[in-house]
Structure formats: C-alpha cells, structure tokens
Amino acid sequence: MKTTIYHLALLLVGVACTVEVSTESDSSQLNQTIDEFNKAFEMCDIQTLDRLTTEPYVHSNGNNPAITKKEWMAYLKKRKAQLDGGQLKVTKYALSEKKVTLHDQSAIVTGLIEMAGMLDSLSFSRKIRVSNFWIKENNQWKRAGFHDTRME
C-alpha cells in the first residue's frame, strides 16, 4: 500500500512539473509568434499573417464594425500595395506594455502599439491600446481575435 501511494505521489509531482514546463514553453513560443506576427504586419507579409490567424478570425477596432479574416486580408492587400507603391512608409511599429495571460491552449495578450510613418506624404504618429486573443492549433499559436482603441 505504501509503495502504491509513493508511486501515485511521484506521478502527481511529475504531472505538476510537466504542466509548469509546458506553460513556460507555451509562453516562450507565444512571445516568439507575437514578435513574428508584428514584424509581418509592419512589412505586410500577407502569407505569414494568413498562417498566423485562425479561421474564423475576428478583427475589430473602435472606429468600425468587426470584420472577418477575408475582409482583413483584403485590407492587407490594399496596405501592401500602398507600401510597395511608396504611398505608405512605416518608420515605427512597436509593441510595449505587453501582458500575456495563458489559459490552457489560449491566451489573452494586451499592450500598447506605437506606430509612425508617412501616408500620401502626410506624417502620422499613433498609439493604440490592443487586446488580442490567441489559441494554439496543431502546436502553433494563432491570433483568433483583435481589438484596438486609439489613445489620442
């Protein structure tokens, strides 16, 4: 009986350690994916953004109704054309105040994005407060939802 209790205790300790390691690994993997996603958005790498968003995906902000992934991808194609054509120049795109809260295979990420550049020869500088919802699909973190609010 003592041997069985001892083995059960070792099993429970092993499971607890596995969960902790997994959470640390998930956090690290998610942070790397967020960095990859933000760099892809700055450069308008549509293939990477498509790969790192879920189906379905919900994108919303304080100025417009929520849009689907298909609608967001259409927006990205217009943005890419502006970047390629020189009408849009991004000089800054940075996430700060990042807070990641893990929930099993999902996470809520909040932060502040600062962006600056030129659009049609007019300079712009913005700060937006963001909330993102991420889920882990097939061992890959993907953004499932986004909301922002302008700070200015």
Image: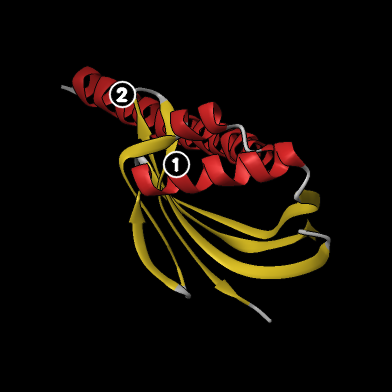
What colouring does the structure picture have? secondary structure
Residue at horizontal 22%, vertical 23%? 2
Residue at horizontal 63%, vertical 36%? 40
Q: Nearer the viewer, residue 119 or 111?
A: 119
**Rounded to the nearest whole Å, what is the CA distance between mark 1 and mark 2?**
47 Å
Q: Which residue is mark 2?
A: 11
Q: Amino acid at mark 2?
A: Leu
Q: Amino acid at mark 1?
A: Met
Element type at mark 1: helix
The correct choice, above or below, for 103 with respect to 16 in the image is below
Foreground: disc 1 or disc 2: 1
Horizontal arrangement in the rendering, residue 120 relative to residue 81 (left or right): right
Q: Which residue is mark 1?
A: 73
Q: Nearer the viewer, residue 64 or 17?
A: 64
Horizontal arrangement in the rendering, residue 13 relative to residue 21 (left or right): left
Residue 41 shows in the view: no
